[in-house]
Image (cartoon, grey):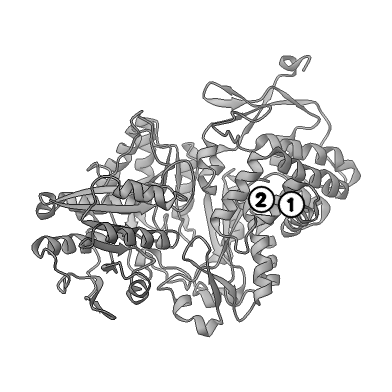
């Protein structure tokens, strides 16, 4: 019996695991193949992001040492997996190491140069290549020349990389067994609780676009291939049975195909029957058609939570041309954002800093133009990903890059349109923008402040950043000192947890608001501005550290957290919904009492800004008579 360990690790250091979808597909395929099913024993080893190498080594090698280790490699685990492969070879010199995934596909020269402990690199869809390679290993014990296995690279002799012809794309995706329905991926902990942050699934593979920065599953610029409706129905029902709260689709352009409407119809029926799932997140189609509007309307009418994305990446015409995105109808985003707001739906936009053709001035102009319609903006540093045209044409664009301290991504630090110093300054702004705007530590203050003080959202973020940098408090100094040069995702999460976990840091933000911002409001608006931050505080998700319990002012109340009634001098919720910011007409003063209600789970889900948005506290207006004496 050939023992195989499949190794996967999530991107974020969070309390819950990420679902090992890639490894699940591979185990399901090997378990279903008549040849390999009888001859191999496959185990999935799934790790959270941030787990120490020693802990992973103990889990992998503490009992039986496998004969084959297959790693699902991405930028955040490339180095760690190389170290684990090196240890594996010491324990089992005859063992076989296989690397697969977007980060190493077609990158065999570099992989073998840096990691001689790797035996094979998979260049395409693993569900085709891995079973063929395993059959070769079964038929040829000790063999190291699988020339007839498609889609792999290996060393025939030191320094000589041999790459076999590409494996054909899987046209009928249903030939890949479901990792859920086959039991390849465990769903629950022994206590019955769903064990992952979200459930990942695909309805299709492929992307018709070929953006310069993207290598979506190795299938960019290709026809989209879909799983059958019946299979997806069965998987949704499986999720409903296991009470999965959120489904995240790994599709590149959901809402593009007619079958996407059918999927939403089946999702709604599943919830009506099972009560779950209750939220869906995905990468939405870049061009928003009538089909997208119908899907959004259906989800809203049936109470599904979702974040609707404007994946613009830049508003600079020069940068769009370099990105090969000019053919996308991104110029229609303003009317779409207005429509989503009118429907009361959560919408956020995506921007990338560092694209050729973009300057700090053009970026801020685009950012603030976006903020006029969508205050929640996700800002990502440009990465030179393997196999993308940016990476292949780096000299033409004048890219200067730096690999991350804790990952293997290439972060852009200069290009022909922005200098290294400009990039470093923008990285610092980006971290604050991601914490405050993308992750919504501030949600309600942006629009009133911009309209009534004349400051743009980027100026507000910069003002708070400078407040922290000039603060003499030890907490603020420690917070600023911990900010790295690159605004990589782990540093954003660390900053966010610091703000939620430290009353001193939140007081620093409150002090900035009351000291710097409130005086800039028209005098008649200042009482409202004072209360605006109080309202901001209570509508944040409730961050409950398991070792500390609820923060001050919150108590567990059945299936949620609640406050006692809190008095306001304005109907804050109504004022924010109306969004009428006439400098001469502040809202009428009136005594209003709110109880704030938030569902539990934010501590475990805050690392993902899309799912974290589902945990914002809701203000419930209560009868003043019930609040007598408070």
Q: Which residue lies furthest to the front in this view?
A: 90
Q: At numbered mark 1, what does the secondary structure look like: helix, strand or loop?
A: helix
Left or right of 517 in this view: 575: left
Q: Taking 16 as reference, is 176 left or right?
A: left
Mark found first going from the N terminus, 2 or 1: 2
Q: Name the residue under label 2.
A: 436
Locate residue 38, reporting x and y percent. 10, 49
Other-residue count near label 2 (Cα within 10 Å), few / some / many at <14 / 14–19 / ≥20: some
Whether 119 is drawn above or below 62: the answer is: below
Residue sitting nearer the eye, 229 or 306: 306
Q: Callout 2: helix, strand or loop?
A: helix
Observer-nearest of 277 and 577: 277
Identity of the residue drawn at 31% across and 63% down: 100
Residue 325 is situated, as x and y percent measured from the top left of the image, at: 50, 72
Q: In this view, does 311 lie above or below 384?
A: above
Mark 1 neighbour class, 10 Å CA radius: few under 14, some 14 to 19, many 20 or more: some
The residue positioned 85% from the left and 42% from the top of the image is 525
Residue 205 appears in the figure: no
Instruction: Look at the picture and state if 469 lies above or below 541.
Output: below
Q: Measured from the top left, where is residue 131 in percent x and y?
A: 18, 59
Q: Nearer the viewer, mark 2 or mark 1?
A: 1
Task: Look at the image and tell me whether residue 95 can be seen.
Answer: yes
Left or right of 529 on screen, residue 224: left
Q: Position of residue 47 (x, y in %)?
A: 39, 48
Q: Which mark is residue 62?
A: none
The residue that disc 1 covers is 477
Give the position of the C terminus as an image quadrant: top right
Q: Residue at x 62, y 33 (%)?
A: 618
Front one among 112 and 147: 112
Distance, label 2 to label 1, CA atoms, is 18 Å
């Amino acid at each position: 019996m050939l023992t195989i360990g499949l190794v996967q690790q999530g991107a974020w250091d969070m309390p819950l695991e990420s679902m090992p979808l890639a490894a699940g597909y591979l185990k399901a395929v090997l378990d279903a193949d008549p040849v390999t099913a009888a001859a191999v024993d496959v185990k999935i080893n799934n790790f959270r992001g941030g787990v120490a190498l020693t802990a992973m080594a103990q889990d992998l090698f503490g009992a039986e040492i496998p004969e084959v280790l297959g790693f699902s490699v991405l930028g955040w685990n490339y180095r760690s997996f190389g170290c684990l492969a090196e240890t594996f070879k010491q324990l089992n010199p005859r063992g076989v190491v296989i690397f697969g995934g977007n980060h190493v596909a077609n990158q065999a020269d570099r992989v073998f140069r840096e990691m001689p402990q790797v035996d094979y690199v998979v260049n395409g869809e693993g569900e085709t290549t891995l079973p063929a390679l395993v059959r070769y290993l079964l038929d040829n014990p000790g063999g190291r020349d699988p020339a007839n296995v498609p889609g792999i690279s290996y060393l025939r002799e030191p320094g000589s990389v041999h790459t076999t012809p590409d494996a054909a794309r899987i046209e009928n995706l249903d030939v890949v067994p479901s990792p859920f329905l086959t039991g390849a991926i465990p769903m629950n902990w022994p206590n019955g609780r769903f064990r992952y942050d979200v459930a990942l699934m695909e309805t299709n593979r492929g992307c018709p676009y070929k953006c310069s920065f993207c290598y979506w599953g190795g299938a960019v610029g290709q026809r989209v291939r879909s799983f059958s409706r019946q299979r997806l129905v069965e998987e949704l029902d499986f999720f409903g049975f296991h009470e999965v709260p959120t489904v995240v689709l790994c599709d590149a352009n959901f809402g593009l195909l007619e079958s996407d409407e059918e999927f939403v119809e089946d999702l709604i029926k599943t919830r009506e029957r099972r009560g779950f799932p209750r939220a869906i997140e995905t990468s939405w189609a870049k061009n928003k058609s009538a089909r997208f509007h119908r899907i959004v309307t259906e989800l809203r009418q049936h109470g599904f939570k979702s974040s609707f994305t404007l994946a613009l990446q830049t508003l600079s015409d020069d940068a769009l041309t370099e990105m090969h995105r000019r053919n996308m109808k991104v110029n229609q985003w303003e009317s779409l954002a207005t429509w989503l707001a009118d429907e009361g739906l959560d919408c956020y936009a995506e921007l990338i800093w560092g694209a050729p053709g973009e300057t700090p001035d053009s970026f801020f102009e685009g950012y603030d133009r976006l903020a006029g319609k969508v205050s929640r903006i996700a800002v990502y540093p440009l990465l030179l990903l393997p196999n993308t045209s940016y990476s292949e044409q780096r000299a033409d664009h004048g890219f200067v890059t730096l690999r991350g301290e804790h990952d293997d991504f290439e972060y852009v630090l200069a290009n022909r349109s922005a200098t290294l110093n400009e990039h470093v300054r923008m990285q610092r702004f980006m971290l604050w923008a991601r914490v405050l705007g993308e992750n919504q530590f501030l949600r309600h203050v942006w629009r009133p402040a911009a309209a009534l003080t004349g400051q743009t959202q980027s100026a507000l973020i910069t003002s708070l950043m400078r407040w922290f940098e000039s603060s003499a408090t030890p907490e603020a100094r420690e917070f600023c000192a911990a900010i790295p040069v690159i605004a990589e995702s782990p540093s954003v999460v660390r900053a966010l947890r610091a703000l939620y976990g430290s009353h001193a840091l939140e007081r620093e933000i409150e002090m900035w608001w009351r000291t710097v911002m409130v005086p800039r409001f028209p005098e008649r608006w200042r009482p409202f501005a004072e209360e605006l931050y109080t309202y901001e505080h209570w509508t944040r998700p409730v961050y409950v550290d398991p070792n500390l319990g609820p923060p001050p002012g919150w108590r567990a109340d059945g299936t949620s957290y609640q406050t006692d009634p809190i008095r306001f001098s304005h109907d804050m919720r109504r004022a924010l919904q109306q969004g009428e910011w006439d400098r001469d007409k502040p809202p009428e003063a009136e005594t209003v009492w709110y109880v704030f209600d938030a569902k539990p789970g934010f501590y475990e889900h805050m690392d993902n800004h899309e799912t974290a948005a589902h945990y914002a506290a809701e203000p419930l207006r209560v009868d003043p008579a019930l609040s007598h004496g408070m």
